[in-house]
Amino acid sequence: MSLLKVKNSWSGHRFPHPPGRRPIAYDALQMRNNTPLTTIMRLGRGLGPIFEVRVFAQKFVFVADAQLAAELCDETRFHKNLPPALVSLREFVGDALFTAYDEEQNWHTAHGVLMPAFAKSAMRRYHDTMLETVDEMFAVWDDVTGPIDVTADMTKLTLETISRCAFSRDFGSFTSRERHPFVDAMVAALMTGMQKGSLDSVPGGKRIARRIDEENAEFRAYVDDLVDEMVRERRETGERHDDLLDRMLYEPHPETGILLDDQNIREQILTFLVAGHETTSGALSFVLYYLSRNREIVAKAQAEVDALLGEDPDAEPTFEQVPKFRYVRRCLDEALRLWPTAPAFARSPRETTTIAAGTPHEVVMTPDDWALIVLPMAHRDPQAWGPTAEEFDPDRFLPENSRGRMKNVYKPFGTGERACIGRQFALHEAVLVLARLLHRYDIEGDPSYELSIEERLTIVPRRFHLTLTRRTPTPVAEEPQVDAGPDAVAPGCPVAH
């Protein structure tokens, strides 16, 4: 019996857990690596719809079942909670949109102020910037003779896109040979918070946390100074750019009239820079991995983009054309099903309730309890996705194949009121990039490559390269008929499902 008070105790209830537990440390020895997600997926195999992993006094409860995950996504009964990693991240980004608690005023103020920045009219303004950034990447690629590092280049692309669209800031990712030092500093500073996630339950954890802070203090200071400089320059020049930063500085909440304070503006900027590029770059990298493994799927996607864009490989889609790339979008949706780049989120009940009622896994859950929905496991549940759940099949998202599927089982952007505010931005950008890339290049992966997951703030393929060959588009005589797709879905829904 441990003398330490268990955190997230679930009233003492014990769930199935991996074999090989040790006294005091429990499952800690099995978690000593830098791949918590894939380790949890491995340890949880065969443990059922809900299981636990305990690291000293910290209990983590995981949900791997689509039906139970869907139950926890019921907004009338459950809400977002912050697991230890996000609590630690608050040291860096405070109560910004991603890391705020529901009841915090800054979340309500920022959400009300920033939501209009992702309306259709705003998205139309971002479209040309997205195209310009893609052109810069293509200019670099056209001079490359060997394979490209997909994840690295997708990360550069999406960072430039969000920084230019949201903050009118150019980091020179494709116009300079050197990577801007802000990128490394930002990632290092944020990884500090992630590393400290559960140290408070580990013997000697406070001492380790202090050492991590000391080692990364320079990165933290550099990032804070650069962001503060962005804000100061905008205020001093008085220039208006009609971007996200302008809204943060000058727009009050439409109902309360409250303005964001400078501290929270810094935290929101950092959140958007990180969340706005990491998730999209990972999504693009994963879909390109799956496309590179299936020539038939690539051919279908290229036939669609050629029909819409014509025979000019430099043709750029209009804003109105992007939602017409239905098959490209289904490829993206399917990649996000298998490897959602923000792969988990935590849920707690609004009041004491029973979950999985009437099943052998029925258990009482209190508002002090939280469970992490592991999306790559729930998204592969054969009960929701059929016997081919492990396979990449874009037609899984055809309307006729989606009818009758249980609700709330596809959640790559989170759920409810706390779902990703920038999901429409990410989807528009990703579809636009894929359409242009497939229209301009044939892609070929290394047949010996085996998918390996790199876990940083999000997940991405590790050491994944593609060889690109310029192609001549072959448009068909008529624009292809398209199925009902994403823009036929209610505006609040991130994906067609």
Image: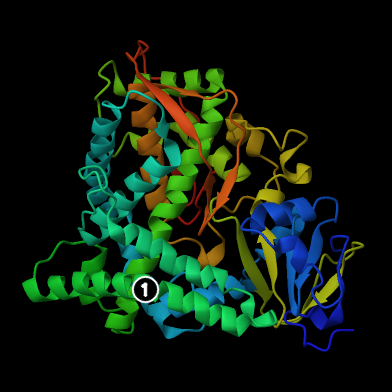
- The residue at 79%/79% (across/down) is 10
Q: Which residue is mark 1?
A: 220
| Image location (x, y in percent) of residue 454 | 56, 49
Direction from residue 53 to residue 222 in the image, left or right = left
Query: Is residue 102 something that shows in the picture?
Result: no
Which residue type carries mark 1? Arg
**Residue 321 x, y percent position in the rendering:** 32, 33
- Give the vertical position of 381 relative to 75 (above or below): above
Work out whether 479 lies above or below 160: above
Quadrant for residue 109, please give it.
bottom left
Q: Nearer the viewer, residue 441 or 451?
A: 451
Q: How many marks?
A: 1
Q: Residue at x 51, y 82 (%)?
A: 210
Q: Nearer the viewer, residue 487 or 79?
A: 79
Residue count near mark 1 (Cα–Cα under 10 Å), binned few <14, some 14–19, many ≥20: many
Q: Quadrant of residue 43?
A: bottom right
Is residue 400 found left or right of 4 in the rendered image? left
Q: Compared with residue 387, is residue 456 higher up or lower down, i.e. above or below?
A: below
Q: Compared to 431, does 300 lie above or below? A: above
Q: Secondary structure at mark 1?
A: helix
Query: With 395 as the anchor, is 429 left or right in this view?
Result: left
Residue 173 at x, y percent in the picture:
27, 47
